[in-house]
Amino acid sequence: MTQHIDAAAFDTGKADAFLDRVAGLVNDGAIAVMVGLGHRTGLFDTLAGMPLATSTELAEEAALAERYVREWLAVMVTARIVAFDPTRGTYSLPAEHAASLTRGASLGNLAVYAQHVGLLGQVQERLLTCFETGEGMSYDDYPCFHHLMAEDSAMTVTAGLFDHILPLVPGIDLRLEGGIDVLDAGCGQGHALIALAARYPRSRFVGYDLSGEAISHAAEVARRAGLENLTFETRDLTGYDERERFDFIASFDAVHDQKDPAGLIRGLKGALKPGGVYLMQDIGGSARLENNLDFPMASFLYAISCAHCTPVSLGQGGEGLGTMWGWETAERMLRDAGFTDVSRRVLPHDPMNVWFVASE
Ligand SMILES: C[S@@+](CC[C@H](N)C(=O)[O-])C[C@H]1O[C@@H](n2cnc3c(N)ncnc32)[C@H](O)[C@@H]1O
């Protein structure tokens, strides 16, 4: 195919600037994969705990192979993430960088999200076929997905659960203390539900998820914690139709990539007892592409959508709404399901997500 170029209108300065941008993003994409690896290997945490280290000292401390650690360090130094003293051959992680790259980091650990970039690469070949055939994918096609997702929601959900998230639901703390029935729909590895069950021993908690692997992990963690007010069940929520069983239902980032999000929300409404409340966290972008140009990490979220959320919904025979299905779509589905009182909030610690509280 030949490309049509209007030589008179061609802006060389603009083309050169764009070329620089493309080169920069290829460089940054490679760095992002290595940042994810730095998290998985524990190299950021180890380096943060050492004021200065040679590659040999760091490799020893992290119990990793020095040759690989040295090459990873070269990426980090040229990316201006790790500082290097060439006279001593030592490396260090500035405290200001550790603040967003280490476990328990004060600003939130963005290296957790960088792992998604590596995951996109892992499914690239399979995705190419999907582009050609239109077919979907299964959660099993994504290595470590549930572990990665649990790390992600540990920051956006579990960390803020008691101080920021439960207060969105008026009176829920007292009701949980008194003893109510609670469902987490699409609970994944269930860490939020486990934290709730530990905090509120008089309430009874149920977690459903399609993934047997995620549910086994959740059940094992609950068993080790000795929690008896909590059960997990592998369950496909497509066509979910329990009636008036729960006082409080939550879903954390678990609606848009299902087979039938509208049907699920209707099912959850039916599963609430009179006076029950549904709390839904989902991605907070708009349904309109043009509104998302300045949405935080919009391109990243659309990339996750293209490589994960859309294919897993299509793979279930679903609509493939995508990650950026939009708060407008979510709100409409809540109202169509019969919720008459619907509020929407974005929390400061988590600008990518929106929280709906729906009742009546
Ligand atoms: C993005 S993950 C979120 C998991 C968890 N809520 C968290 O915050 O870590 C979405 C979850 O929805 C589950 N899911 C997708 N389709 C489902 C279905 N049809 N029935 C039940 N669970 C489903 C997936 O297995 C996955 O664990």
Image (spheres, rainbow, N blue to C red):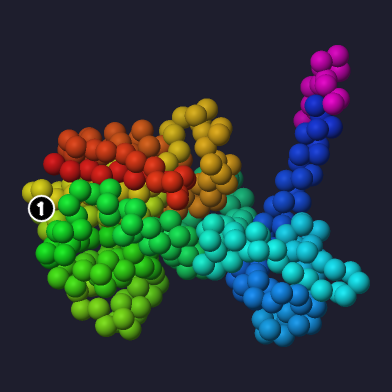
Q: Residue at x 76, y 39 (%)?
A: 21
Residue 7 image point, x, y percent: 86, 18
Which region of the structure is painted magenta? 1-13
Q: Residue at x 73, y 79 (%)?
A: 58
Quarter location, residue 67: bottom right
State the quadrant of the C terminus.
top left
- Side of 332 where 70 appears, left or right: right
- Side of 148 where 195 appears, left or right: left
Q: Is residue 186 above or below residue 291?
A: below
- Furthest residue toward top: 8
State the quadrant of the N terminus.
top right
Query: What is the crowding at mark 1: few (fewer than 14 residues within 10 Å), some, or many (at least 20)?
Result: some
Instruction: Say whether residue 329 is visible.
Output: yes
Quarter location, residue 246: bottom left
Task: Look at the image and say whether residue 5 sits in the magenta stretch.
Answer: yes
Quarter location, residue 109: bottom right
Q: Secondary structure at mark 1?
A: strand
Residue position marked by numbered label 1 in the rendering:
273
Q: Nearer the viewer, residue 263 or 251?
A: 251
Q: Main secondary structure of the magenta part?
A: loop
Q: Give the total of numbered labels.
A: 1
Instruction: Say whether residue 234 is visible.
Output: no
Q: Nearer the viewer, residue 159 or 332?
A: 159
- Furthest residue toward left: 274
**Label 1 lies in ligand 1 vicinity (Cβ under 8 Å):** no
